[in-house]
Image (tube, helix red, strand yellow):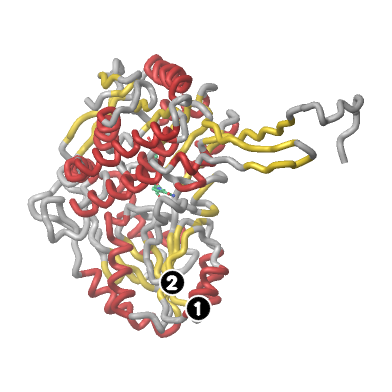
Amino acid sequence: MVPLFIDGEFRQSASAERIAVTNPATDEVLCHAPCATADEMEEAIASARAAFKTWKEVALPERARLMMRYQALLKEHHDELAEILAKETGKTFEDAKGDVWRGIEVVEQAANVPSLMMGETAENVARAIDTYSFIQPLGVCAGITPFNFPAMIPLWMFPMAIACGNTFILKPSEQDPMTPTRLAELFVEAGAPKGVLQVIHGGKQQVDTLLTHPDIKAVSFVGSVAVGQHVYRTGTDHMKRVQAFAGAKNHMVIMPDANKQQVINNLVGASVGAAGQRCMAISVAVFVGEAKDWIPELKEAMASVRPGPTSDPAAAYGPQISARAKSRILSLIEMGKREGAHCLLDGSQCEVEGYPNGHWVGPTLFSGVTPEMTIYKEEIFGPVLSCVEVDNLDEAISLINASPFGNGTSIFTASGAAARKYQHEIEVGQVGINIPIPVPLPFFSFTGWKGSFYGDQHAYGKQAVRFYTETKTITARWFDADIPAGGVNTSIHL
Ligand code: NAD
């Protein structure tokens, strides 16, 4: 059983309730995640609260040095972490390494925290009066993470929160808790003091405890739309600061002047990579005008890639995370056919030799998709790409702006004017120009919009520092003999 990490100790939960963690390529049980008991939750929160008192007083450069040591250890254990991650997610080894690497980059950003936590100053805001601000941590923060990036997404959260002087309780996905456990072990090895990070496991009940507990000041969430809305509503109802990153439906616009081979290569990678289980995956290709003539070649390119186990270096991607996820995808593919889309490539019968119990779905391509269809509206989270055809760029922009989601999008074109118009008018938070998956590096922030994000301040970068801190503004006057005492004043100064 995966241990809980409470008050500086890795220990077995007393809970009888547990969730099986499986290898999605074989369906074999790898371990179990316990559902932490109410007492264990209380203990974790109390320990984090106690640790905050001392951790917030630790000097900024010392907090930064913890992140530097952690970064070095994560790099040293990069392959080992990727192996654990690949086993419980089914990702290819290279993709698993990428998952870890994108997290390491956030730790590097967290090591910059001294300069990120500098406030502002102004002298003589009134005669002999100065104003300056400090940035101070909030207290105990919590993070709830999804299955699809078990290294990167926990690392979006706790290094930034802790570097800012907070303590943190992580509730990773119950589907792949082994990677976050190893991340916590390495954090201890890097010198993290007792109680600064706690890791608890479970599902709705444990999440709801975090959302309602008076000692939790802020909650970061990444996951599906329904749960994201629940987390945002419940957390804010309990007067907490909440940032909730939710589902997506990302469009790529293909202009007829784009480089055809680049378009095809990038569309295949961005739609089926990680078995389509990325919140920034491209799930809709919007062909403008004559670009639609490339669909047959896109089909050929998609048909040439296949899923497989981590041990197969020729596999383009791995299995879906669970039998439930696979069966949901297959029913959406069926729905697409029933609602009149043309299924050019159907991956629903996919099998992988030697892995009869893996949750495989082959690359799937639909053309003639319209906005009313379920496969257009729903986040499928599988290797399924829908092609939509429009006459011009304005039509493409209107289509995408009407989507309730706004996580990522991209345009492939050789025209600077088209790209400039697109970046300006599109109502999506992360835009790629000839880049299919424009995830910003951690010195920027991860800025999804609309139904893909509930909250104000986003993940990592300067926005994460604002999310995990309060600003205290001080206005100061020092009397000396030259300043007359004046009289009592009962009105506001003009
Ligand atoms: P999920 O919503 O099922 O689970 C996310 C977390 O919430 C897990 O820790 C889970 O234990 C917990 N949870 C599940 N049901 C709950 C409930 N009823 N109440 C409280 N907590 C609950 O998401 P998932 O399937 O693990 O992840 C896939 C989803 O995450 C996709 O929709 C994807 O788009 C989204 N995602 C979004 C981003 C982003 O940045 N916008 C990034 C990665 C993933």
Q: What amino acid is found at the position of numbered circle 2 in the picture? A: Ile
Question: Where does label 1 land, which residue?
Answer: 418
Figure check: 133 above or below 10:
below
Q: Residue furthest front?
A: 481
Secondary-structure class at tag 2: strand
Q: What amino acid is found at the position of numbered circle 1 in the picture? A: Ala
Q: What residue sits 37% from the left and 27% below the top?
A: 197
Number of the label disc, if any, that sits on residue 411? 2
Quadrant in the picture for the C terminus: top right
Number of the label disc, if any, that sits on residue 455? none
Quarter of the view holding residue 336:
bottom left
Of residue 329 and residue 291, the one placed in the foreground of this image is 291
Of residue 328 and residue 53, the one placed in the foreground of this image is 53
Tell me whether the residue at label 1 lies in contact with that at label 2, contact meaning CB atoms closer than 8 angstroms: yes
Where residue 219 appears, as percent x and y from the top left, is 49, 34
Q: What residue sits 44% from the left and 58% below the top?
A: 249
Can residue 455 be spotted in the picture? yes
Q: What residue sits 65% from the left and 37% below the top?
A: 132
Left or right: 204 with respect to 398?
left
